[in-house]
Image: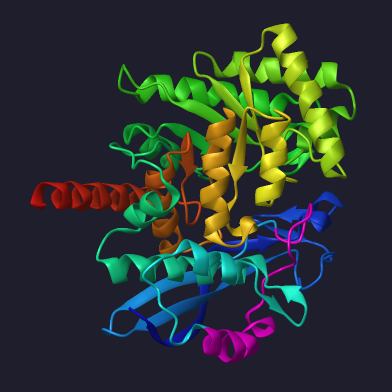
Amino acid sequence: MKIRDVVYSVGRSAFMNKDLAAIKGGAKPNGSIFDGEPVLPGFTRVMQPGIVISVMFILEDGSIAHGDCADVILTGYAGRDPLFRAEDHLDYLRGEIREQLIGRDISTFSALAESMDSHRHEGKRLHTAVRYGLTQALLSAAALSNRITMAEVVAKEYGCAISDSPIPILASIHKDDEGQLDRMVLKRIALLPHASFQVVERDIGLKGEKLVAYAAHLSKRIREIRDPDYQPRLHFDVYGTLGELFGSDIDALTDYIGKVSEAASPFKVLIESPLIAKTQDQQIETFLKIRAALKRKGIEVGIIADEWANTLEDIKRFANEDAADFVQIKTPDLGGINNSIEAVLYCKAQGMGCCLGGTANETDISARVTTNIALATKPDFMLSKPGLGGDEAVMIQTNEMARTLALIDWGIRAS
């Protein structure tokens, strides 16, 4: 099966882009937005709506393969590519890239995905968002060509075994929406709430009191309404705010993590990005110190790396140095989804935990594609996406897993 034509459209992502440099630099919260001047290139406001470029391959038999180019919420920060803007990419996508893809055989995925992921335009690699969307469409096309699921394509080409049960989901929801929390508990979501703790004074408290109180409230509410056997893990993404609060005092920082863990009892706690260092070397060095201190003190909290673990090579380094308990494989940051596939498999081979993540700033298409990848590669858990509504993302991913597993089972029985 070959690609007959390539069509693009510009649409909306499920969330927003935020200029984290401006937020860390003092932009003032104003409801759900921020007042202040943007700092990072491409931003016209500190917080602005995200966009996507949808990729559609028209195949020889008339079927259509889909992928969506999207970037993360906190784009252009900590080594990431700059803000994704459609006007920067449409001309060469409709010209050079379309011409390269027309007539290509798409019966297999990995080789063509690697070729597209490494492609250079005017001497530079394509934006991670572009590589992300193009390779989604390539996986979709390979599945259509072979009349199998995307999970089966990945399993066949990368030599992995598809999970026989759904992958646990980390529900990403607004921390102040009690209704969302209740619904996730009633739906027995494995990990929650992810939330967003980006500003020390607003989210953590100048003495750390707000996060501790939130963890205690969360624990209390879950225990009030849960099924007796429901035991989720509590996940807090703190965007480096603990490093801002405690500076280089690792002892004080880890003691504080212990307080959060106590407040969250009886539920186990995961902390993502306790600090964001200025370089990757500093990030790894400090994470190693944090993990060693937690172990010494007997504090059972998992530490998750996100910032500075942006590429396949970055993730391999974190895994090789055992710098975290888990790494979030933030799929749009890795560019081609072939890199996300390899990242999960590498972490598993090294004995390091991983979340096949992403961002609220994605789409239903990218969520479905990466859900198939999760079934094939079996990360420890995956992040709910798109959006921060919880219900919609969990619905998309849960149903995609159920449909895919049912079709695979049918295929096995039919053969």
- 92 sits to left or right of 208: left
Identify the residue at image location x=26%, y=60%: 148
Q: Please state the horizontal and vertical placement of residue 189, each as a whole percent of the image.
A: 39, 35
- Camera-side residue of 26 and 3: 3
The image shows residue 44 at horizontal and vertical percentages of 76, 74
Q: Which residues are magenta?
A: 75-100
The quadrant in which the N terminus is found is bottom left
Residue 44 to residue 291: above or below = below
Report the residue at 42% width, 41% height from top.
179
| Residue with the most extreme right position | 248
Quarter assignment of residue 272: top right
Residue lying furthest left:
414
Does the rendering let one see residue 187? yes
Q: Is residue 175 visible in this depiction of the protein? A: no
At x 57%, y 40%, the residue is 346
Quarter-of-image position of residue 309: top right
Residue 410: percent from left, percent from top: 14, 50
In the rendered structure, the answer to whether residue 411 lies left or right of residue 250 reads: left
How many numbered tags mark residues here? Answer: 0
**Colour mode of the rendering:** rainbow
Q: Is residue 354 magenta?
A: no
Frontmost residue, 195 versus 2:
2
Q: What is the x, y in percent for residue 62?
A: 28, 85
Q: Is residue 115 above or below residue 337?
A: below
Between residue 323 and residue 59, name the one nearer to us.
59
> Is residue 407 placed above or below 355 in the rendered structure?
below
Membership of 81 in magenta stretch: yes
